[in-house]
Amino acid sequence: MASRAIRGGLLLGVLLSAYPPIRLSAQEPVDRGVRIGIVYRPGVRPGLVVLAAGPAVDSIRAIIARDLDYSDRFEPITLPAGDSIRLASSDEPAPRAAGGGRATRPGRPAGLNYPLYQALGADFAVEIRALGDSTVVSLHDVAAAGVRRALRTRLPPPTEPGFRQAVHRLSDQLVQAALGAPGVAATRILFVRDGKVHEIDQDGADMRLVSSSDRQAMSPSWAPDGRRFAYMEFHAGRGQLFVHDLAGGTRRPVATTGQALDFTPSFSPDGRTLAFSRATEEGTDIYTINVRDNCCLQRLTVGRFSDNLSPTYSPDGRRIAFVSTRPGLAQLYVMAADGTEQQMLAAVDWGVTGASNAPEWSPDGQSVIFHRDVAGTLQVFVLDVRARVVKQLTSVGRNEDPTWAPDSRHVAFVSDRTGYRQLWIIDMETGRIRPLLQQSGARLPSWSPRLPEVAATNPQPGRGNER
């Protein structure tokens, strides 16, 4: 009995250990080390230029341009230094909007010089203007010589906490208007650093502390409403789960947790249920609890000389992927949400790869991302759930703890490829990789869903109301 509890404790110990900085030598270039298993099709993204009329909107332009670049859906076009918006002559008739009708050009009489931007290779032009106390952002379809969509909004002052998220939402609306696909600019990523939970915008800006305690925080996981997250606090060999409200900065303990080693919480898609791992004298197993009513603990797995941990729900809520050591090494399994029909999910290359850990189901339900031991070093893999085909995504350095963006296209993960453990983001379609946070020591990231406006507040971190 005790040996199984020790084994479960060792599994958690991997999460709790503070890896010392490791300097690497002979690194291959960063942008080449991540395209294993990715089909790269250059030259198919539409060209995009972002224009600002005057210094009053320069900060807005900078955020939108970065968001659209980081969406990896456009080919950014950089204008020569000092270039400005090129307007058509004021007596020129207004061009017709894409799809017919007059172009929408709030607050100005003339359009862009479309031939100029078409010659530069732009398919779209984003124009940003100040109009009284409002900001007008227009998406121009260059080929159609018209405005596809104009957005007029009153943004918070740049000094207010909600400013950046408001601009990010404009970026997402532009992606939707241009390509019919929702963007992910208005999202944030939780991570653990120095034993506390922090969050950061997806563009790597506005990092802030969101939980503060004398105990070590671990395993943050977003609720599907984007207003809460669950996490574990480790103390005296025990792990207690909390649900933290971002708008109010308060938290409440999850019932029945804290008497054992409870960790790796994961919300169900409806936000009512929290699945988690519990290590006791009987082994490490997966449980669920109704966090809406703070009741109804249910055990889903029975160790029987193996450990079961790290649950992650499918988007429809019907299945749970998890890690089990029943084959000997930790590998990916799947079961129905009630604990029945347990079976191996990912094939094992015995003798080639080792233990698999940290699974997360993609928001579109098609894939599970995870990390796996390859020759003594962790690498990120993705599993096609339907075909049961596994592909390796990283090869440079140690790469672990991947987490999906809500577009099921981008993945954040931890890597020491530059010599220190930092947060990185990879685009699954192009293979582009970029650092999210260049400070060392970040661990266990969790990417948010698209955030509601209430989550853009900036409460003071602290213990909050513990009930």
Image (cartoon, helix red, strand yellow):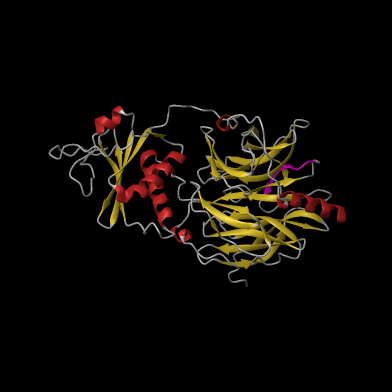
Q: Percent from the top left, x then y, of residue 194? A: 64, 55
Q: Percent from the top left, x then y, of residue 336? A: 67, 49
Relative to residue 333, is residue 2 drawn left or right? Answer: right
Relative to residue 415, is residue 13 drawn left or right? Answer: right
- Residue in view at x 62 percent, y 47 percent: 440
**Nearest the eye: 308 or 35:** 35
Residue 259 lies, with reference to residue 315, above or below; the image says below
Q: Percent from the top left, x then y, of residue 137? A: 31, 47
From where the camera sits, is residue 266 visible? no
Q: Percent from the top left, x then y, of residue 214? A: 67, 65
- Residue in view at x 23 percent, y 45 percent: 105
- Which quadrant would residue 374 be assigned to in this image? top right
Highlighted magenta segment, given as a residue range: 329-336
Residue 68 lies, with reference to residue 201, above or below; the image says above
From where the camera sits, is residue 72 visible? yes
Residue 254 lies, with reference to residue 12, above or below; the image says below
The reply to whether the magenta stretch includes residue 333 is yes
* Quadrant, the C terminus: bottom right
Number of dots carrying numbers: 0
* Quadrant, the N terminus: bottom right
Relative to residue 420, is residue 136 drawn left or right? Answer: left
Q: Looking at this rendering, what residue extends furthest in the left direction?
A: 91
The reply to whether the magenta stretch includes residue 60 is no
**Nearest the eye: 432 or 386:** 432
- Residue in view at x 72 percent, y 53 percent: 16
Main secondary structure along the magenta-highlighted residues: strand
**Nearest the eye: 344 or 203:** 203
Residue 29 lies, with reference to residue 314, above or below; the image says above
